Image: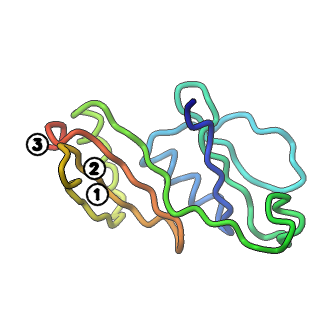
Amino acid sequence: MHLDHATIVTPDVDAARRFFVDIVGLTDGRRPPFRVGGAWLYAAGRPVIHLVDATLPRAVASDAAPSGAAPRIDHIAFRIDRADAWHALIARIEAAGVGYQRADVPLTREVQLFVALAPGVVIEFVTAAEHTSS
């Protein structure tokens, strides 16, 4: 089993798209012609992030919550396996003026970096601690 994709419902699809393309390094890709606007962003040829325009009423935008309860994503995590990719990500985040928090994972040799993309949406990047040293 593997993660297929994550869907983020946002009132600012373009800002979220720019973050994932310009900073994270995903690419824009083909998206089926749904009734609601959005974007599909790809990694390694697969659509891993689905952005959905939140300007439509909840009943139209989400069949997953027919009772009216709003689904929520706490965070989405991306694993980075190379030191050069980690440092390039940090450089892009800092060049864009995007704030982040770094945390060392207890009892492991991993480092996490958290970016608040929007209220209620956090993006985590995780790597081995040895990838973070200069």
Position in image of residue 64 (x %, y %)? 80, 58
Residue type at mark 1: give it: Glu
Residue type at mark 2: give it: Ile
Q: Which of marks 3 and 2 is in front?
A: 3
Residue displayed at 31% across by 64% down: 100
Q: Do the residues labelled 3 and 2 touch (CB within 8 Å)?
A: no
Q: Name the residue under label 3.
A: 133
Q: Locate the N terminus by quadrant.
A: top right
Residue displayed at 53% across by 74% down: 119
Callout 3: few (<14), some (14-19), or many (20+) C-alpha neighbours within 10 Å?
few
Q: Are marks 2 and 1 in contact (CB under 8 Å)?
A: yes
Q: Name the residue under label 2.
A: 90
The front one of 118 and 18 is 118
Side (left or right) of 63 relative to 83:
right
Compared to residue 69, the image places residue 37 above or below, namely: above
The front one of 58 and 89 is 58
Q: Locate the C terminus by quadrant.
A: top left
Side (left or right) of 105 relative to 47:
left
